[in-house]
Amino acid sequence: MIGAKTGFVSFVSAGPGDPDLLTIKAARLLAQADVVLFDDLASGPVLSHVGPQTELVAVGKRAGRASPKQHHVSRLLVDHALTGARVVRLKSGDAGVFGRLEEEITALTAAGIAFEIVPGVPSACAAAAAAGIPLTRRLTARRVQFITGADVTGDLPQAMNWAALADATATTVVFMGKRTFPALATALMDHGLSPDTPALLAQSVGHANQTLTRSTIAALAAQLALDTGDQPALILYGPLAEE
């Protein structure tokens, strides 16, 4: 019974947004949950799996929009679990990839609340699959690296390993990087990466309005300097982001 004991939190990875890409465990936990705290990118059709008894709480954060602060989200998570509820914290993509998972785990641990992490399809993998390309390629791309294009202020992070990021034999996936990609591309070219390096802009991956734009790092930087649009996006560059 809710309130009889401390609840339990399941960090559920929603995948890129296509409900068909949910894991069986994710769908089951959504159906059983008393409360679901969901991100903006983990909403829509995915939420059709929740039961009629479930309370839905939107806690999503999007760049350039008014959003709940992280400490507020963590507090909500703890407060709901302390009622004895079965809580699902629904995160887009895979919860462990740029999903602020650690801060929420820290809050639960401090409150003595048990949790589990349910992995999901990372949006980077979904973007590559949608484009019909692998993330790795024998001999030419033996390494994959995920980076964020924005720090807590929304600017390009200062502490970057430029030798790794300008490695022409690696596939690099940039999360939250549309606004800062022109500066990133300039720095990459300054560190020796060819301006003709293939790039892929994958927007609204896993949703009905998904778009995939093949380009080069120089051309994509010029495009995004003029207009970033408002769709969430990933940018892939390296030897795989090509036909």
Image (cartoon, grey):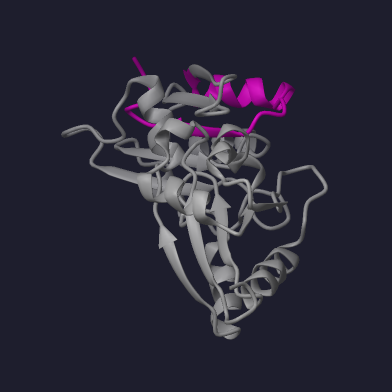
140 horizontally vs 15: left or right: left
**Residue 99 rendering spot, x and y as whole percentages:** 55, 55
203 horizontally vs 94: left or right: right
**Residue 242 rendering spot, x and y as whole percentages:** 36, 19
**Residue 61 rendering spot, x and y as whole percentages:** 70, 49
**Residue 185 rendering spot, x and y as whole percentages:** 55, 34
Query: Does the magenta-highlighted stretch encompass residue 218?
Result: yes
- Against 23, is 102 above or below? below
Measuring 59% from the left and 40% from the top, which residue is drawn there? 47
- Against 85, is 59 above or below? above
The image quarter containing residue 193 is: top left
27 horizontally vs 54: left or right: left
Measuring 34% from the left and 35% from the top, which residue is drawn there? 168
Q: Work out which residue is located at the far top of the displayed protein and give it.
A: 243
Measuring 33% from the left and 44% from the top, which residue is drawn there? 144
Residue 163, visible in the rendered structure: no
Measuring 54% from the left and 24% from the top, which residue is drawn there? 218
Query: Does the magenta-highlighted stretch encompass residue 80?
Result: no
Q: Which residues are magenta?
A: 215-243
